[in-house]
Amino acid sequence: MDKRIKKSKRAIEEALISLMAENDFKDITIHSIAEKADVNRGTIYLHYEDKFDLLEQCIEGKIQKLLNFCLPEGSGSQPSKSSLLRIFHYLEEHSFIFHTLLTNKGVPTFRKKIVTVMKAGMKEQLELNGVNQHINKEILIQFLPSATISVIEWWIIESMP
């Protein structure tokens, strides 16, 4: 991807996150994003259909970066103590972004996507490694990702105690 395109997209996404820290998503306009990013509205529409597409791509990108950082290729998708520590260090380094995406009341999408990704990973791990026969696999797949994201939300909202 061209450097200028990367720079524009990064500025647009940063502007969106910054505005979401101050406003509900429903109140943010393409005009306000363009103004904050110091780009023309046309530049935004060149890369995104609308603010919802921008949010969707931003969320997908943040989740992908988190996964790439915390579960590097070749490490397998099984969580380990070191991968969990990497997750929390990454979340701490990018706390503004994750705090904003997790706490903006107009955007439940981010939480849902993370839980969905975690459920898929857990299902894969349970299929590979098996599970105690006395434990209902479906309940485990529903419970653990939701509990984990709740702890992460609490940790970020409470300023990482």
Image (spheres, rainbow, N blue to C red):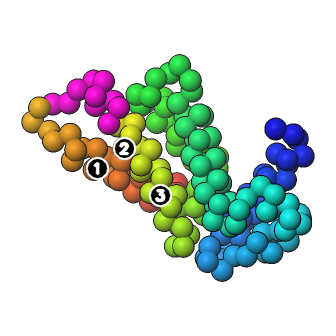
| Nearest to N terminus: mark 2 or mark 3 | 3
Q: Mark 1 and mark 2 in contact (Cβ < 8 Å)?
A: yes
* Residue 13 placement, left or right of 152: right
Q: CA distance from mark 2 to mark 3?
A: 12 Å
Amino acid type of the residue tagged 3 in the rendering: Arg
Which residue is denoted by mark 1 in the rendering?
142
Q: Nearer the viewer, residue 130 or 50?
A: 50
Q: Secondary structure at mark 3?
A: helix
Which residue is denoted by mark 2 in the rendering?
119
Quarter occupied by the N terminus? top right
Quick check: can you spot residue 95? no
Give, as a single range, the part of the protein colored magenta.
Answer: 123-132
Where residue 143 appears, as percent x and y from the top left, is 28, 50
* Residue 42 placement, left or right of 123: right
Amino acid type of the residue tagged 1 in the rendering: Gln
Number of marks present in the image shown? 3
Where residue 62 appears, as percent x and y from the top left, is 62, 48
Q: Mark 1 and mark 3 in contact (Cβ < 8 Å)?
A: no
